[in-house]
Image: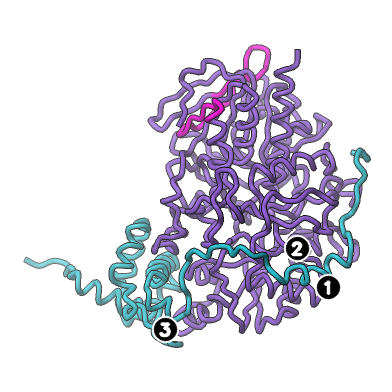
Chain colours: A purple, B cyan
Amino acid sequence: VSGARDVEIADVLIVGAGASGGVVARHLARAGITVVCLEQGGWTDPADFPGERPEYDALVTRPWNADPNRRQHPADYPVDVSESDVPPTMFNGVGGSTILYNGSWPRMLPSDFRVRSLDGIADDWPLTYEELAPYYARVEQDFGVSGLAGDPAYPPGPDFPLPPLPLGPFGRVAARGMNERQWHWWLHPTAVASRAHGHLNECVRLGTCMSGCPRGAKASTDITHWRDAIADGAHLVTGARVREVTLDARGRANGATYVDRAGVEHHQRARTVVLAANGVGTARLLLLSRSAGHPDGLANSSGLVGRRLMMHPPVSVVGIYEEELQTWMGPAGPPVISLQFAESDDARGFPRGAKWDAFPVAGMHAHVERMADRPFDERFGPAYHRHLVDHIGHAFDWDILIEDLPLESNRVVLSEDLRDADGIPAPKVHYRLSADTRANMAFQLARATEAHQAGGARSTYVAEWWPHQGWHLLGTARCGDDPATSVVNGYGEAHDVPNLFVVDGSVFVTSSAVNPTPTICAFALRAAEHIAGRRSAP
Amino acid sequence: VSGPRVPTRSRVRARIDALADALVPGGDGMPAASVAGATGEPLDRVLAIRDDLRPALARVLAAGGPPLDTLRALHADDREAFEAFAALISCAYAMCADARESLGYPGQRAYPIPDREDPDVAELLAPVRARGPRYVATPAGDAR
């Protein structure tokens, strides 16, 4: 761990060492810029990940669970979810939520950047797919993405740096069903290394990506970015929980105040501040950073900080098959993606759509846990074994990510009574599914049931995703060209504070239906290039 | 000297066995929880990870009556305690080799990626390719 006590004034101070923070740090450090990053968590040791430990099933229920309210690591802060249909999930530590994601790596669709123009709802992004495409290609290299070029759901693009991961037995069944329906599918691009790449080892298909990869084959920024960033001179301070972004007399950001794990308060000075703390953490920090000039929170003259939270409420349809599908064989990132119903279709009666992926469930207990809403006799007693016999190796999910649209009522605020271990107000999430989202869900679930049936499933049922997890924290500091209707511009620079940047999922204007990490990282790389260019300008 | 009777360790274990077997009985070719060994060392190891569930486990053990009736009553009246007990036993059961073997489940283990590419992927994808591009084009620089 590289400390920063010797850096009096950082050129750039980054808050959060996750996906976007790692991308920015590596780019700026390589450009010779003095970077300090404050991260409230620490490093994870792959040997601690549950994947190859006998206690796997128990370990993922709490210490390696994605819900910070369940996990309760010292680095975690509580989230008040008393008024949310979906609890946010995240990981606080070096690598951020890439420690626990499954590495799904789809680009957003071109239409995702033009929802207002095409659908007459929500807003357009201040940048286009074509503008972001070169950055997508670069982060695909940096994260060692395995995939197959030529997906007709996207404009032509370059080859992926690594060959696709094997389709596997259940991927074939999923593909068979989609071909039967004449629906779109493709090999899912995944930031899991099908061959050794950079600091990444070759995947051995443990199937436990979502509790950390014990073999170092999944691209998390602790591996792919921070090692190089530190080698290039970046200073990473772990155990540093930021409580406020501070301003100078001219109203420009001049650093951040943080609390270390001993409870001691520090201040790190900086010429530029970059927030990379995810769609909940960044909004929380901006709201915490109130001052006389920013009474409603920093960079919040639009009133949109914390608002428009989007979380991709996930649902799935489970298909049970007679044939042996070896669903315990990884990677736990899905082998198959479908964008058949991702684009808008007026005939459906709701805007936008959803992304599907064919998804395995690792372990034994997870199959039981996700049935928690069923009556006793459908879960335990004789039903326990029947359920496991049906599911282990014979069932997979069509997992559906719903594109939820931005609503100002879905928001992050500061909790009035919940505080973290350092006494800092916790975030409170207000999030309700809209009528459009529910209509979208109902449509997609019906189609996914048909896909399973076409693939030969002997039975299907709708399952809530164990249960309710909000993996994607988006939209709470949206980007845009108009300071009245957005928080930051297309480079993530705050309209109100010109040397303050936001580069995480908070900047999303709309959510797309696909996993956001590739877009977060591409946006962050573009922002980092902008910051570096401005600093080197005469 | 009189006072509340304190269950001995063996009595506690016997009660855990009985409750666990009511939750996960033998059947479908699979062993009951205690027969698989779940209530021994595996449960201890799960409790070491989930020590937050000890108070709920104590409530379960404090409830008297026939095991299945006790579990049903807890499911109805103290769901938190029931779910805690269910999680402990189910996670411990997943650690038992006999249980896994009965399911044909090898556990999460390494399967190195073969050198050769999937031979049938091109054929499977052929109809997808044949249908052509399906994205909605958005010319660069259009209205923002």
In contact (CB < 8 Å): disc 1 and disc 2: no
| Chain under callout 3 | B
Both labels 3 and 2 in a single chain: no
Q: Which residue is mark 1?
A: A182
Disc number lying in front (1 or 3): 1
- Residue type for callout 3: Met
Furthest toward the left, the residue is B1
Residue A286 relative to residue A536: left or right: left
* Magenta part of the chain: A231-256
Relative to the observer, which residue lies in front, A337 or A279? A337
Looking at the image, is mark 3 or mark 2 nearer the viewer?
Answer: 2
Q: Amino acid at mark 1?
A: Gln
Which amino acid, mark 2?
Trp
Quarter of the view holding residue A327 = bottom right
The residue that label 3 is drawn on is: B30
Res. A170 visible in picture: yes
A18 inside magenta stretch: no
The reply to whether the C-beta atoms of the residues labelled 1 and 3 are less than 8 Å apart is no
SS of the residue under disc 2: strand
User: In the figure, A382 relative to A500: above or below?
Assistant: below
Q: Position of residue A15 (x, y in %)?
A: 58, 31
At a point 84% along the width and 65% down the height, the residue shown is: B129
| Left or right: A218, with A518 as reference point | left
Quarter of the picture containing the N terminus of chain A is top left
Task: Determine which residue is flagged by label 2.
Answer: A186
Instruction: Residue B46: name its quadrant.
Output: bottom left
